Image (cartoon, rainbow, N blue to C red):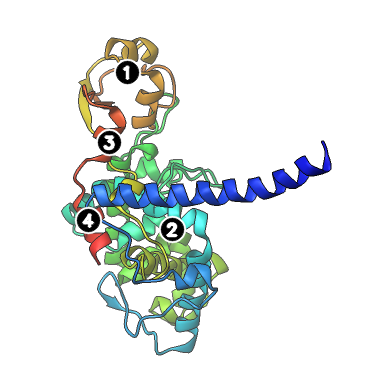
Amino acid sequence: MSFTKKHLLLIIAPLAILLTAGLGYAIGKQQCAQHNATPNDNIPNLYTNKGAAPPLPNTLDFAGELVPLDVYYVRESLDKELIINCYQHSKTIQIIKRAARYFPVIEPILKEEGLPDDFKYLCVAESGLENVVSPAKAAGFWQFLASTAKIYGLEVSDDVDERYNLEKSTHAACQYLKKSKASLGSWALAAAAYNMGEVNLRKNIENQNIENYWDLYLNQETSRYIYRILSYKLIMENPRLYGYDFCPAHLYHPIPCQEITVTSPILSLYDFAKEHKVSYKELKSLNPWLRNSKISVSGKNYTLKIPQKSKNNYYDLYRHIPNPYVVDTLNN
C-alpha cells in the first residue's frame, strides 16, 4: 500500500465510524418516536458516562418493611450493590430488556399468591431473568435445587423439568417464601432464607440473638443478598435516574402465544413442532422445561406454548404488543 493510500484510509475510517454511529443514533430516535416514547434528552446519563456516585434515597422499603438507611452499615451495603449494578452496564441493560417480557408473567402470580411485588427483584437477583444453572445445580429463574423443587410440587425428570417453567416455578417460589415469612416473621428474613436456607438462617438468629436481617452477621453471599435485590429495585424503577434510557422499541416484549394441552405422551417433539408449523427451536425456546426431544410420561397433562403466527412481519407483531409495564416505567 502506498503512503497516500495509508493516509487516505486513516482519514476515511474515523469518518465512517462517526457516520455509522450518528446513523445508529438517528435510527434509534426514530424508532422511539414511532412508539410515542422519545429518550429524555433533558436527563443526562451522569452515572454511566462520568463515573458519578449513584444517588441513594432518603427512605426505602423492602416488601413494605422499612430499610434502616440511618444505620451506616446498611446504607454503605446498599451503596456498594447499587454502584456494582449501576455500572455493570451490559448485564443491567439486558435485565431491564428482559423484564419487559417476564415481569408481566411474574407480577400477576405474586399478586395472586399474596406476595409483595418487590419479590420480582429477588428473581432478578437470583438469575438475571435467565434459565441459568448454578454451580450447586440450582436451575431456572428462581434457582431451585431439584430436591426443593420436588417438595414444592415441581416435576424434575429426564423429559420435563418444571424449574424452567416460569409460571409453575413462580408459584412454587411464592409458597416457599410465604412459609418462611410465617416462620421467621419478616419478608427480609424470608428472602434471606431463600438464599441460605431456613435452617442455617435460624441457627444464626439463635446464636446471635438477633431477629432482623439488617443486624445479622451472615456469610458474604447472604449479607449482600437483600441489598442486591434493593439495588435492582432502585435502578429498574428509576432507570433514567441511574443512566439507563429505553423506549419500547429497545425492549423484549412478550411473545404472543397460543397454548396446546397434551394428555398423552409425545414420542417426537420434532414431529410435534412440524405438525403445528413451528420450528423445533421455537418450541424449545418457548417451553424451556422440555428437557428432551420427547415426553414419555403418561397419565399427566402438559400445556405447551407455540407462537401465534401473523401475516404481518413477525418482528413487527412482537415489537408492537401493548405492554403497560414498559409504558409506566418509561414515563416515570
Q: Nearer the viewer, mark 4 or mark 1?
A: 4
How many callouts does the rendering have? 4
Q: Which residue is mark 4?
A: 327
Image quarter where the N terminus lies is: top right
Please tell me the numbered disc located at residue 318.
Answer: 3
**Viewer-nearest residue: 125 or 148:** 125
Could you say whether the residue bearing mark 2 is in a helix, strand or loop? helix
Q: Earlier in the sequence, mark 1 or mark 3?
A: 1
- In 3D space, how far apart are the residues under numbered discs 1 and 3 (Cα atoms)? 16 Å
Looking at the image, the residue that sits furthest to the left is 112
**Viewer-nearest residue: 42 or 119:** 42
Residue displayed at 37% across by 84% down: 68
- In 3D space, how far apart are the residues under numbered discs 3 and 4 (Cα atoms)? 16 Å
Q: Earlier in the sequence, mark 2 or mark 4?
A: 2
Residue 69, located in which quarter of the rendered image?
bottom left
Q: Identify the amino acid type marked 1.
A: Val
Q: Identify the amino acid type marked 3.
A: Tyr
Label 1 neighbour load within 10 Å: few <14, some 14-19, many 20+: some
Label 3 neighbour load within 10 Å: few <14, some 14-19, many 20+: some
Q: Is residue 217 left or right of residue 10?
A: left
Q: Which residue is mark 1?
A: 278
Q: Are marks 2 and 1 in contact (CB under 8 Å)?
A: no
Q: Which residue is mark 2?
A: 125
Residue displayed at 56% across by 69% down: 220
Q: Are marks 1 and 3 in contact (CB under 8 Å)?
A: no
Residue 53 percent coordinates (x, y) = 50, 78
Q: Earlier in the sequence, mark 3 or mark 4?
A: 3
Residue 266 vs 319, above or below: the answer is above
- In 3D space, how far apart are the residues under numbered discs 3 and 2 (Cα atoms)? 27 Å
Residue displayed at 21% across by 24% down: 310
Q: Identify the amino acid type marked 2.
A: Ala
